[in-house]
Image (spheres, rainbow, N blue to C red):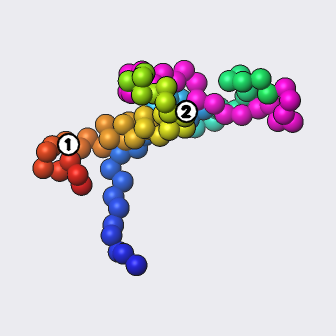
């Protein structure tokens, strides 16, 4: 078994409470719920009609729309959360450390 270490240097979040770390954290600390009626599709045929969607999500500032159209929403969420985590980390990505 490998004993490689992982260091978390940044956090990225897209949650029902907000589309970034600050708004999600604020919602958590204020005890808000991100759960509500499902509006992304018609859920009337399902027994459960409540869920937690990501409000006001716009992928355009992060991923070219042409590419985003070919991705499922959960992939878009993951990529944007990763971008937020990289920005939060404060890491300076250069040619010498790009592949690490």
Residue 80: quadrant of the picture: top left
> For residue 41: magenta?
no
> Which of the 4 image quarters holds residue 91?
top left
Judged from this view, the residue extending furthest toward the left is 96
- Foreground of the two, 46 or 11: 46
User: Relative to the observer, which residue lies in front, 64 or 51?
Assistant: 64
Residue 89: image location, x then y, percent? 30, 43
Q: Which residue shows up at 20% across the image and 47% down it?
A: 98
Residue 86 spot, x, y in % from top left: 32, 41
Between 93 and 74, the one nearer to me in the picture: 74
Q: Are marks 1 and 2 in contact (CB under 8 Å)?
A: no
Residue 50 at x, y percent in the picture: 76, 32
- Neighbours of disc 2 within 10 Å: few (<14), some (14-19), many (20+): few
Q: Nearer the viewer, residue 25 or 50?
A: 50
Residue 44 makes an appearance in the image: yes
Q: Position of residue 54 (x, y in %)?
A: 58, 29
Vertical order, 39 against 53 (above or below): above
In whole angstroms, how far apart are the C-alphas of marks 1 and 2?
27 Å
User: How many residues crowd around disc 1 within 10 Å: few (fewer than 14), some, or many (20 or more)?
Assistant: few
Could you say which disc has been placed on residue 33 in the image? Answer: none
Which quadrant holds residue 64? top left
Query: Quick one: SS at disc 2?
Result: helix
Mark 1, residue position: 93
In the rendered image, is residue 33 in sight?
A: no
Give, as a single range, the part of the protein colored magenta: 44-63
* Left or right, 68 with reference to 33: left
Side of 92 relative to 85 (left or right): left
The quadrant of the picture occupied by the C terminus is bottom left
State the predominant SS element of the stretch in magenta.
Answer: loop
Q: Residue at x 36, y 54 (%)?
A: 8
Helix, strand or loop status at disc 1: loop
Indicate which disc residue 73 carries.
2
């Amino acid at each position: 078994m490998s004993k490689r270490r992982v260091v978390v240097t940044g956090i990225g979040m897209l949650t029902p409470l907000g589309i970034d770390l600050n708004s999600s954290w604020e919602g958590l600390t204020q005890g808000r719920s991100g759960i509500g009626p499902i509006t992304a599709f018609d859920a009337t045929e399902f027994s459960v009609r409540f869920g937690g969607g990501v409000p006001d999500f716009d992928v355009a500032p992060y991923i070219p729309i042409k590419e985003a159209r070919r991705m499922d929403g959960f992939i878009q969420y993951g990529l944007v959360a990763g971008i937020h985590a990289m920005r939060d980390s404060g890491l300076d990505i250069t040619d010498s450390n790009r592949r690490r």
